[in-house]
Image (cartoon, rainbow, N blue to C red):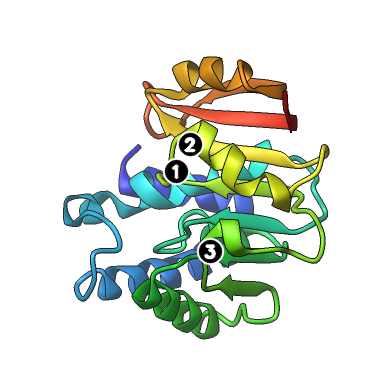
Amino acid sequence: MTEEESRAWIADQFGVSRETMLGRYAAILSEEAERQNLIAASTLPSLWERHLVDSAQLIPLAGQCGGKWLDIGSGAGLPGLVVAILTDLRVTLVEPRSKRVAFLRDATDALGLSDRVTVQPSRVESFHPSAPAAVVSARAVAGLLQLLSSAQHCTDSSTIWLLPKGRSAQSEVEAARRKWHGSFHVEPSLTQPDSGIVVAKGVRAR
């Protein structure tokens, strides 16, 4: 996808007003990327494709979930803030690094999302939500086995796990099946044809 095609895809999938708001976030992210290493500088020219559409493609995979979306290691807000911008869901961004926590809070305020977005300044292992997450996402955070172990206490059998895993998706799923029950499959990425998104449901330890 070109940047123009990426913006058009967002507008078509989520509406022009949401695409406009995502553009505001893109500007905030680009400005902050000059001060801290939120995303690789080499990806800034393809921000919409490499980061925004790459994050937004998770939303249809969540189906009609009505609960909270938990994003682990949110960093620059990918995919968690993108989800909050493009949907009406309540989103919790779990991020342990103080500079990124400050950025996420500032961006949430600037975008008028403070009523639906919570920034949790900790590792997910230390976070104990009041109710299980409906969806868990994590982008470029850790291996699948580690993610499942670290966040299992935040979930229940109905939780949908949406985990972009790049080229290693299938091999990570095969390893996970040896230690975890559940339904695991790999969806192809819209933005990187050789990459996959692990979609898991009914996850519990063997």
Figure quadrant of residue 63: top right
Secondary element type, mark 1: helix
Q: Amino acid at mark 1?
A: Asp
Secondary element type, mark 2: strand
Q: Quadrant of the C terminus?
A: top right
Residue 55 position, x and y percent, is 49, 48
Q: Which mark is residue 81?
A: 3
Residue 87 position, x and y percent, is 67, 59
Residue 101 position, x and y percent, is 44, 75
| In the image, residue 45 above or below residue 168 | below
- Is residue 17 visible in the rendered image? The answer is yes
Location of mark 1 (residue): 54
Q: Amino acid at mark 3?
A: Leu
Distance between the alpha carbons at the discs numbered 2 and 1: 9 Å
Secondary element type, mark 3: helix
**For the residues bearing labels 1 and 3, Cβ distance under 8 angstroms:** no
Location of mark 2 (residue): 164
**For the residues bearing labels 2 and 1, Cβ distance under 8 angstroms:** yes
